[in-house]
Image (cartoon, coloured by chain):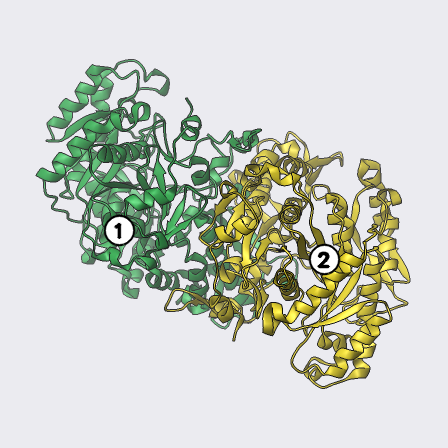
Chain colours: A yellow, B green
Amino acid sequence: MKDIEIARAADMKPIARIAQNLEIPEDALEPYGRFKAKVNLDEMPEVNSRPHGKLILVTAVSPTPAGEGKTTTTVGLGDALNRIGLKTTICLREPSLGPCFGMKGGAAGGGYAQVVPMEDINLHFTGDLHAITAAHNLLSAMIDNHIYWGNAENIDQRRIMWRRVVDINDRSLRSITTGLGGVSNGYPSESGYDITVASEVMAVLCLAENLQDLQDRLGRLLIAYRKDKTPVYCRDLKADGAMTALLKDAFRPNLVQTLENNPAFIHGGPFANIAHGCNSVIATKTALRLSDYVVTEAGFGADLGAEKFFNIKCRQAGLTPNAVVVVATVRALKMHGGVAKNALTEENIDALEKGMSNLERHVKNCQSYGVPVIVAINRYGPDTDQEIASIIQRMEKLGVKAVPCTHWANGSKGTEQLATSVSEILQTTEADFKHLYEDDLGLWKKIRRICKKIYGASKVTCDQSVKDQLKAYEEQGYGHLSVCMAKTPYSFSTDPSLLGAPTDYSIHVRAVRLSAGAGFIVALTGDIMVMPGLPRHPAAETIGLDENGQVEGLF
Amino acid sequence: MKDIEIARAADMKPIARIAQNLEIPEDALEPYGRFKAKVNLDEMPEVNSRPHGKLILVTAVSPTPAGEGKTTTTVGLGDALNRIGLKTTICLREPSLGPCFGMKGGAAGGGYAQVVPMEDINLHFTGDLHAITAAHNLLSAMIDNHIYWGNAENIDQRRIMWRRVVDINDRSLRSITTGLGGVSNGYPSESGYDITVASEVMAVLCLAENLQDLQDRLGRLLIAYRKDKTPVYCRDLKADGAMTALLKDAFRPNLVQTLENNPAFIHGGPFANIAHGCNSVIATKTALRLSDYVVTEAGFGADLGAEKFFNIKCRQAGLTPNAVVVVATVRALKMHGGVAKNALTEENIDALEKGMSNLERHVKNCQSYGVPVIVAINRYGPDTDQEIASIIQRMEKLGVKAVPCTHWANGSKGTEQLATSVSEILQTTEADFKHLYEDDLGLWKKIRRICKKIYGASKVTCDQSVKDQLKAYEEQGYGHLSVCMAKTPYSFSTDPSLLGAPTDYSIHVRAVRLSAGAGFIVALTGDIMVMPGLPRHPAAETIGLDENGQVEGLF
C-alpha cells in the first residue's frame, strides 16, 4: 500500500481526544479542522509547574539516496514507547509546501509510521509557513520603503542583507533586480528569493521561548549596513512589532496524531544547513511538560543535525537530552561502503563493514556529548540476517546496542524492541550532557573544533577576510554565539562524494554570516542551496484532486 | 470607543452555535479556532434541494474621502433583518492582509456594525489569500521551469502574461527582472508582482461553481504566447491540478458572525477594477440555500461594483437579485457638490442638492436592471434634519424610498427602519432582472454600452490596436464574455476629479486584456494600480502585541 493509502485508511480520533490524553485544557485548544489544533499556552499557565519528561533525540548516519528513515523511526519509536505503556509525545519538524511540487514525497513519515492528516500537514497545514513568509516579506518591503521615503537611516543600498522568501521552488527568483520601471517604483536594487524555510524568521520562531523573546529576536535581525558600515537592525525600522503580530498564531505549537493515535507536535522546520534544522523549542518544551517521554529528530545526519541540536537548540533553550538514537540502514551503510544504488539488494558484508565507518563516527560523536546512544537498524526486506548481525556486533564493540526495527511495515510492533531498549537505557544510564565548546571559546576556534572533532578534518582553512569578519563579530559583541555549519550532509567532509568516514582532508570556510536574531554565526562551506529548482517534470504536473475531492499525486 | 475595542468587547458565540442556527450539519463544519469555520459543502449535499432565499445587493455612490459605509450598512441591514425576525445571512468580501500594514484600517465593518473576530479576519483569517498566493506563484515557477528545461511549448519569453503576486504592499516589486546570476538560474526575463487580490486566481475562485469548475477555469488561464503568437494556457503546462489541490480548502466558504451573533460568510475578495469586486459565488449560493434573505455588497460605487455584480457575477452564476440598496452619506454628497473635506460639518443644502446628481445617476442605473431600489442614508452626527429631508424628497421624485440609518452608533436598532422598508419592497415589488447587454452584442459594443448607459459618457474611443485585439478575442471564441471595466471609482468618468454626474466627456480605452479563467475581458482606462506602496510611515511601525498578547495598532 502507498503511504497515502495507509494514511487515508487511518482511524483518526478527534484532535480534542488526543489533547485530553495530554491533559490540555479545552480552552487552550484551537482546532484547525477536526484533526489539527494549535495549543494556546496562554490558557494553560499551570503547565510550567508540571515535571519535565525525558528527551530522546533521533538522528542518523550521513544520508544517501538509499534513504535512512529518520522521521519514520521517530514516529515508530514514539508509538512503541506508548505501546509499552510510557506516556510519550513526538516532536517533528513542519514540512515546507514548495518542495512537494518538485520531487515526489511528503515529510510526515511513511508506511505504518506516519503522522496524519498527511495531505494537510504537507500542504498548508495551519498556515505557519505562510505567516513566516508574510512576516519576512513585510520587512523586505519596509526596507525598500524606508529608502524610497528618504532613507533616514542612510542604508547603503548595495549592502542590504535581507532578501525575500517564497515557499515555492523557483530558481528564477534566486537573483533578481527590483525597483525598476521609474520613479514611483523606488530605486533599482539587487535582491533575490530564498525558500521560506531558509528565512531567519523561521529559525527565530523555532528558538524563541515566548512572544516577547520572539519580538526581541526579530528586532535583532540584521538587515543591512549603513553607508558608514554600521549595522541596521529590524528594530531600527520598527518592523518587529508587526512581524510579531503576524506570527502570534504561528508561534503556537501544532498538535496532530500518529496513525496509532499518539500525540505529535509538528512545529517549525528551519533549514538544516544555514540554520539549525530542529523543530521549535516551544513545542519541545511543551511536550516535555505534557508527557514523560519526548522523541524528536534533527535534520540531515548526526554531524549536522545532532551537533546543532546539542550546541544550538539545547544550549539556547537549556535542554538536556537523555538519550540519542542513531538510525542506520544496511542499504545506506553499503552505499557508504562503495556499493552502487542498483546493487543494494545483494548481500555484501565487506561493503557493509567498510561503510560502517560512517555509523561508527556518528555514534562516537554522539557519545562525546555524554549522552547514552542506541542504534536503530531500519530494516528493509532484502537485508540479510548476517548483515543485521554484523551491525549489531560492530556496535557492541563501542558498547552500543543496535536494534533492528520494522516500523514501516509493522508500526509500533516493529519498534517495540527499540522502545524497550531505549526505556532501559534511560533507567540505567544517567546522561552527563556537555556541549562541544564553551560560549567563550572564540568563533574561529569553535569552527575548528566542530570540523576537527565532529567531521574528522585534518585541516581547516579560510581567507583572511573571513577571520577579519569573525573578529568584527566578536568586537560587536557576538563572540559568545554558537556556530551553525552550512555543509553538505552527504559526507563528513565538504565533498559530497567522500562517503564513509573520510580522514586527511581539509575544510575551507568560504564565508561567515551573522544570524543575530536566531543567535548564531553561519559558517559557509561549499555551495549551499537556499532556493531549490523544479525538476524537468515537477510532481505538480500529476498532482490534483480525484473524483472524491482528495489530493492525488502528492506522494 | 474604537472599532477594535467594540470588537473585543463582543459577546461572541461559538461558531458551532452560529452554524446550528443555519442548520449546517456538524460534519460539514471545519473549525478554525473557536470563532471561525469553513463549511464543507461535500458533507451537506442536501443543501441544493433547499429553497432559495432573496438576494439583496448593497452598493453606493461614487466613493469620496468622506466615506460612505457600504460594509457597515451591509452588516447593519443584515443584523436588522434578523432583528425583525427574518432569517438573514450576510456575504462579504474577505480583506487582504497587505494593505493593513500600510494605511490604518481593517475591512470588517465598523462601530456597532462589524463582523468578528476582527483581527483574525484582517490578518491571516483561514489562509485563503495565502493559498491563492501559493497557487498563483506555483504557476509562475512552472512557466519559468518549462522554459529552463527546453521550452517544449516554444513560449515567447517576451510575451509571458502571467506575473507573480504577494499579499504585501511592495512597490519595489512592481517591475523586476528575474533569472539573473547565471546558467543554473534560468534565462533573464522581465516580471513583476501584483497584490494577491489582483490575481486572476482570486477572480476564478470567486466565480467557480464547484471544484471541477475551479480546475477548468484555472486550466484556461492565459499565461503566455508562443513564438507563433498562439496562446499558451495553464493547462498546457499541467499546472491546473496542483493549483486546485492548493485551493481545495480555500474554496470552502468561511463562516463568522456579526457583533449581534448573526451569520456572515466572508469569502473571496477580488479587486474591483481589473476584476469584478464581489465575494464568492459559492458563498452567496450557499447563503441563499441556508437562509431566507442574503445581504451582500460589491466593490466601489454602483457604476463599477453593481454593474459587475449584475453583468459578471449574476450572469455567470445565474443569480437573480431581488433588491438593491444604494448607500449615500450627506458628507459624500456634499463633496460631490463641491464642498471641501474640512467644511463637511456645516449644513449646505445647495451643495447637497448639486451633489445628489451622483446618487441620482447611480439609482437610475440600478433601476435600469429592473430591480427595486432603496437608498440608505448612513447618518453622521453633524448631518442636519433638513439635509436628510432633502435627500428623501429628491429620491421620492424617482419613486425611491430613502431611509436614514445609524447602525454605526446603534447597531441593528439604527437600521431597523431600513430593514422594514427592504422587507416591504421585497414583498410588494417583484424584480424583473435583466442584464445591461446580451452575450452576443460584440465586445466593443459592450464597452460602449457600459460607458454610455452607466457612466454617461458622450464618446468612447480607443486606438486601432485595441479594436484589433478585441476582434482577435472574438475570433478566438471569447466574444461572448462579459466586459470588466478598470476605471477610477471616484468619478463616473475616467478623471477622478470630475465629481457629481459629469456629462459631455469622453472615455478612452487604453488597452484590453483577456481573463479567460475568470471569463471576462478587462478594459483598461487610465492608470490602474495593482500593487500599492507603503506610506512614509506605514501602520506596520505601530502594530504589535500588547501585554495581553492582543494585536494593537491595527485599527
Q: Quadrant of residue B386?
A: top left
Q: Residue at the far front: name it.
A: A85
Amino acid at the residue labelled 2: Leu
Where does residue A179 sit, x and y in percent of width and height? 56, 44
Q: What secondary structure is marked by label 1?
A: helix
Chain hosting mark 2: A
Circles 2 and 1: CB atoms closer than 8 Å? no
Instruction: For residue A453, say whether it is visible.
Output: yes
Look at the picture and state if B454 lies above or below B233.
Answer: above
Where does residue A80 sit, x and y in percent of width and height? 63, 64
Look at the picture and state if B72 lies above or below B351.
Answer: below
Look at the picture and state if A277 lies above or below B338.
Answer: below
Provide the residue designation for mark 1: B285
Residue at 15% across, 48% down: B434
> Closest to the observer: A267 or A321?
A321
Chain hosting mark 1: B
Provide the residue designation for mark 2: A57
